[in-house]
Image (cartoon, rainbow, N blue to C red):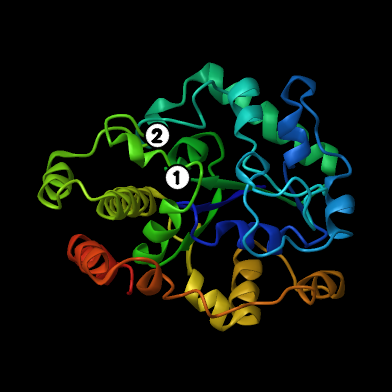
Amino acid sequence: MLSVVAGTGRCGSTLVQELIARHPDVGFVSGLDDKLPRLNLRGRFNGRLYRGSVPRPAGMTSLRHSRKLLERGRLRVAPSEAYQLLDRQVMAGFSRPCRDLVAADLTPFVARRLRAFFDSRIERQGCSVLLQPVTGWPRTGFLHAAYPELRVVNVVRDGRAVANSWLQMGWWDGWRGPDNWLYGPLPGDLREEWEESGRSFPVLAALGWKMLMASFGEARAAHPTGQWLDVRYEDLIADPRGQVARMLDFLGLEWSPAFDRGFGRYEFHVGRGAAYRDELTPEQVAAVERVLEKPLAEWGY
């Protein structure tokens, strides 16, 4: 079964993906597979190698944007969005669409390639669940059109924290403005909010989260009942065992002794939840909160 861990980016979806991938019945596409897209590796030993490795250190970013040549936890096989591989083997542009990919975007040609890509990895890895992380646009409608049983774990984080984190990431291209960033043009009402803010970059990051979360809301409404699970990052950090058990149950997985050993290697830190209040000015926080008032309330913040 193909399942997805989805989120906006910098929302905790990587932690969720890596936690669940500790389960012996879960397979995934690895970063090594993605770095060698021409070989189209199926990842036969991904799970075995990953489950013997240490957890991802807190704060680790991609090698391309890392300030350290060597760091603990870097040399390991671990789950990956595998966008280079998906772009090459499934559909060019899967990684950077200007809007969400929905069911109507799936052509018969791409559907065959998509099924071949994931089915071959499910067979090669011998897993009951192949878990694929997806960040940015949901793309769940697109994937569900090929996999009607698709289950989605949607990881949600406070938009103020996400916007602040985006500003600190080397991959965030909002500095070039919304006519040139990876999410496509802002809708008219969001464009007006950005202009009214004096083209504030923290506000632009917040509007990016707002736009993506509206898309996640639409994707959730279109998805079959019982095949979509929202998980708040803050709830996961406060009650990791309870929230992870909830996700395993949703995916049809048991909390086995082998998984418990992997889970026990993780530490969960509460302290970063309101870091945006120290890392943005009071005026910037106020501007961000003005444009996010409604979606924050809708998502329980």
- Rendering quarter of residue 5: bottom right
Q: Residue 230 in the image: state x and y as whole percent.
A: 46, 65
Whether residue 53 sits left or right of residue 290 in the image: it is: right
**Which corner quadrant of the image does residue 118 belong to?**
top right
Q: Which amino acid does label 2 sit on?
A: Leu
User: At 68% from the left edge and 43% from the top edge, which residue is drawn?
Assistant: 63
Q: Is mark 2 on a helix, strand or loop?
A: loop
**Residue 97 screen position, x and y as percent:** 42, 30
Q: Residue furthest top?
A: 109
Residue 142, given in percent of the width and then of the height, sits at: 46, 35
Image point (81%, 38%), residue name:
123
Residue at x 65% of width, y 56% of height? 60
Q: In which quarter of the image is the C terminus?
A: bottom left
Report if the CB atoms under discs 2 and 1 are less than 8 Å apart. yes
Marks 2 and 1, Cα distance to the nearest angstrom?
A: 9 Å
Query: Which residue carries the number 1 mark?
Result: 136
Residue 281 is tagged as none
What residue is at 23 percent from the left and 39 percent from the top? 186
N-terminal of the pair, mark 2 or mark 1, is: 1
Dot 1 surroundings within 10 Å: few (below 14), some, or many (20 or more)?
A: many
Determine which residue is flagged by label 2: 182
* Amino acid of disc 1: Gly
Q: Where is residue 247 in the image (x, y as percent from the top left)?
A: 60, 68
Of residue 192 and residue 133, the one placed in the foreground of this image is 192
Between 237 and 75, which is closer to the camera in this rendering?
75
Which element type, helix, strand or loop, lies under badge 1?
Answer: loop
Give above or below for 54 relative to 135: below
